[in-house]
Amino acid sequence: MFKSNLLSHLLFGNQSINMYSCNKCGKYFESERYLERHNNRQTPCKLPTDFCSDCNKGFASAKSLWRHRKICSGTGISRKGICRINGIEGCGLLPTTLSNSKCLKIDEESNDDDEEDDDKDSYEDQSEYSDEDVSEEEKSKDVGIPNIPNTFVWKVDESVKKAHSFLLPRDIRGIIVGKSGFGKTTLLNYILLEPNILDYDTLIVCGNSLHQPEYKIMNAAFAKNLSKEQIKTIFEHQNEAMEEGGPENVIENVRDDKCKGNINAQFYTDVSKIPDPVEHDAARKNLLILDDIMLGPQNKAEAYYTRGRHNNFDVFYITQSYFRLPRQTVRENANLFMFFLQDKKNLTHIYNDHCASDGISYETFCKFCSNVWNENKHNFVTIDITQPVDCGKYRKNLSEFWSPLYDKVMQDN
């Protein structure tokens, strides 16, 4: 595709495409048949370890990344595929939101040969890095810092791989902000229990509101070794559960051989009792939920935002005030934000912390937020700072992208 047509393609091309994703590697296919063929391959899926600094596309080896960089223009669009950002709905929103990178492609996969060729260039590539294929000078270019070889990057043990949704960062340090009654707990329950959103096998919940029925049900259900899907079913059939004596009674009567979960869950009302991150097993997929602990000591929360990643911890802090969060430890280390309706004071701090350097005016940012919140009381604005500005950093709710570039194009027209 010619560069002069790139913007038009991003905004208006290919508006209705069915997406099918592999829940192991996150790769997308345009038909269920191609996904089935992908899953039946003998070669196992492999998650990306090397990423292009221009388009953020992921590869399974440094050799594949080096080969990609020779043709990458920073657009993330390949001649063998089409852009995942398709269609326009509403003012500035790109509703199809299906990528970790700027514009990953969907394989056209017209035949088996196409799939084999694409596997050589995609992040599923199984080839090994070879010094004979890549010179020392070229190898030094494959890391983020120029002229520093990857010899000095200690490779992390990748035996534990978290299969989070592609809509979330690989390592999550999240903050959910909103007043009472706007839906923070509902959003949290969705993130915790909806399949293929969060991948965890150890859950720690700390808060002053564990008396809420949602937490009481999850506490009892995880203690019974129910799976996330089984707990979700209880929430979906509340009337039936009440007719059978209440959710606690339903959980208690589940036969042990029917319990399909393996999540180790712990619930605390005193934040000071939470173990330090180093006391946890880094070989597990750990998740910490901090729910409205603003009145307690913040040193434990700060420890998880500054050091939790090294012990394989994802963390969410649920609070009513963004401004009151510790700035240098929690706010500046967070990478995922979900904001329900905010006042002007908090909105100013949010803009200064995360948006001012993106070339977006304060008025434009406020207009976007207002449009989201005015549409529905329970809507929220998502800011994912691990994503590009025009492809996933700004969203309505979790999955509808907002593009400042699109807004500017529409205003100019």
Image: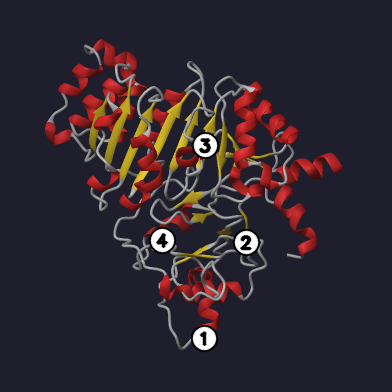
Q: Does residue 148 lie above or below 388 as drawn? A: below
Which residue lies at the image location 58% right of the left edge and 61% below the top edge?
108
Callout 1 amino acid: Ser
Q: How far apart in space, not on screen, are marks 4 and 1 (Cα)?
A: 25 Å
Name which quarter of the figure residue 406 lies in: top right
For the residues bearing labels 2 and 3, Cβ distance under 8 angstroms: no
Q: Going 34% across and 23% down the picture, which residue do you hit? A: 235
Front-most of residues 344 and 200: 344
Q: Amino acid at mark 4?
A: Leu
Q: Residues within 10 Å of mark 3 (few under 14, many from 20)?
A: many
Residue type beneath disc 2: Gly
* Residue on which disc 3 sits: 337
Q: Nearer the viewer, residue 239 or 77?
A: 77
Q: Position of residue 250 (x, y in %)?
A: 21, 20
Residue 292, image x, y percentages: 40, 24
Mark 4 and mark 1 in contact? Answer it, CB < 8 Å.
no
Q: Which residue is mark 4?
A: 47
* First reached walking from the N terminus: tag 3 or tag 4: 4
Badge 1 marks a residue whose secondary structure is loop
Residue 179, placed above or below residue 164: above
Q: Which residue is mark 2?
A: 76
The residues tagged by marks 4 and 2 sit, at their Cα atoms, a distance apart of 18 Å
